[in-house]
Amino acid sequence: MFAHPLVRKISIAVAIKLIAIVILFLAFFAPADRPTMDADAAARAILSLPIEEPVP
Amino acid sequence: MTDMTVVDLSRAQFALTAMYHFLFVPLTLGLSVLLAIMESVYVMTGRPIWREMTKFWGLLFGINFAMGVATGITMEFQFGMNWAYYSHYVGDIFGAPLAIEGLMAFFLEATFVGLFFFGWERLTKVQHLAVTWLLALGSNLSALWILVANGWMQNPVGAVFNAETMRMEIVSFMDLFFNPVAQSKFVHTVSAGYVTGAMFVMSISAYYVLRHRNVAFARRSLTVAASFGLASALSVVVLGDESGYTAGENQNMKIAAIEAVWETEDPPASFTVFGLPDIEQRKTHYAIEVPWLLGIIATRSLDKPVPGIFQMVEENRERIARGLDVYKALAILRADRTNAAARAVVESGWRDLGFALLLKRHRADIENASATEIESAAWDTVPDVASLFWSFRVMVGIGLLFIAMFALAFYLSAKRRLHDTRWLMHVFMWSLPLPWIAAQLGWIVAEYGRQPWAIDGILPTFLAVSDVPASNVMLSLGAFILFYSALAVVDAYLMVKYTRLGPDNYRDQAAAPKSAAARPAE
């Protein structure tokens, strides 16, 4: 089974695919480039009210 | 105001990667079970041809698995980069089943894929059979956990909103796991995968029969696939009906859009077989209706109404108004964490908060929204009726066609005339793309039908995206298109090459000498 040409072809294809995924990750999705999101950032993202508004 | 270009590009990117990944998934699900069935016959009968069948279909399974694996991980990249608010808001819940899928199901599947291919000469027959069944189990468990996560997006149960952390937090894992939407989606999706596997085997076997190659191999494959395909096709329709029922319980708007139900009819509602939904005029032209049918399908009763779009828009308008009160209370609570009155409003009304957030598409200071803007936001809760109406009908049409095809194939197989019926062999051979078309349409019905929500009724999609430049998303989308196109070419090349080589020739490529016992026993 290891000697079958398909194993070699698939191994090369999977290796190239994994390298491409790593390159995509580093180029476009690296954690350092991600927007920071915590409770305060989430609140700023959705809330735009003056805080003096009365509670209904 | 949200940059809708970023929203649209992020959605397009996620749709591209999800739909591409889902080209591989159904075949993995279906073919893994078919391999286990074929190998079980081999172990029970000891006839080498069944071993050869398992190995050859396993070879095509391996190409599909190798090309498909890791194409889904790019969706997880996107959660962090393009969907930062989504990840923060629901990551506590959504992340759990995804992590379990990776740690439990995918590792199980990946381990046994290796043992399946490299264990033929190292394991006993029974050990290898156990490996093949565990491979099938791992594939199906993987689907289960993914659909538990997806089911929660459709029906967010077992979680509450925490104003301190500004996110949804899980309160009942059992509710999450036994979410009826997730369970019905799981069995429906897995059955669709089985149909895909059966059609794949039928189509390629028909190709061999029509070319008078590997006929003994193809006949046995046709027999297994016809019976497995018939059972699966029936399951898809029955379980799809159950999926529709659970959607009717939890996602009325989606059902109304799929069926183009504009007005609430007196029960039981009629089913529109054909019609031309007109979104501008909010009516369906030339509707051909079957009395009672929709009421029975959607409510399992003759006396419960199926709410129409107009009625639900009216209800959603009220939810927007209630949500605005919660929104104001949340703002006060964020400024003064000791404000018990504001906290009480948020804790009792957080389920309506998402409806108020729909107004963010129309203005930033939503507390000042006009009646016209509230009306527009209420109509935003209606998904694209025409797309859903037609996607659903084509999907169901293909599903019913599968039942007819597999039933005929099963009957002819029982009469031992299947492989002699050449016109049916042609039909099966050319029907190969149909399960993928149906599966992709099913994805459109489920996910496009969820719009405008990322989490149904909780988080609008346009608010789930990150504040990132549109050019970044466009560049990464372009990179994905190039990457996945290249991968598709390699996959198609390998699949076509090894299908054409067939069970009689693919071994000739191996450097190792062939054993006489390993040749197909035709």
Image (cartoon, rainbow, N blue to C red):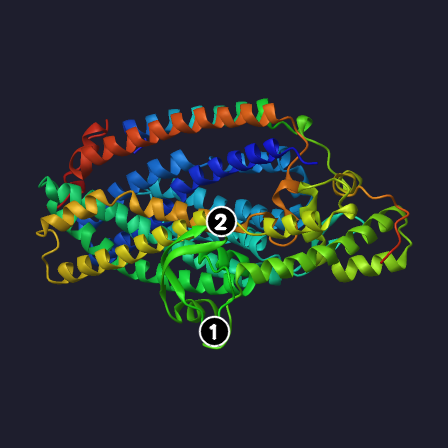
* Residue assigned mark 1: B267
Q: Label 2 marks which chain's residue?
A: B
Task: Describe residue B340's horizontal placement relative to residue B166 as left or right.
Answer: right
* Residue assigned mark 2: B279
Residue in the picture at 29% in, 58% down:
B400
Residue B457: where, in percent of width, then height? 63, 54
Quadrant (top left, top right, bottom left, bottom right) of the N terminus of chain B: top right
Q: In the structure shown, which secondary structural element does the residue marked by tag 2 occupy?
A: loop
- Residue B25, compared with residue B152, is above or below; it is above
Give whichever of B30, B511 is nearer the camera.
B30
Residue B348: where, in percent of width, then height? 77, 62
Residue type (three-letter) at the residue carrying disc 2 = Ile
Q: Quadrant of residue B235?
A: bottom left
Q: Quadrant of residue B408?
A: bottom left
Determine if residue B160 is in view.
no
What's the CA distance linking mark 1 and mark 2?
24 Å
Residue B83: where, in percent of width, then height? 63, 38
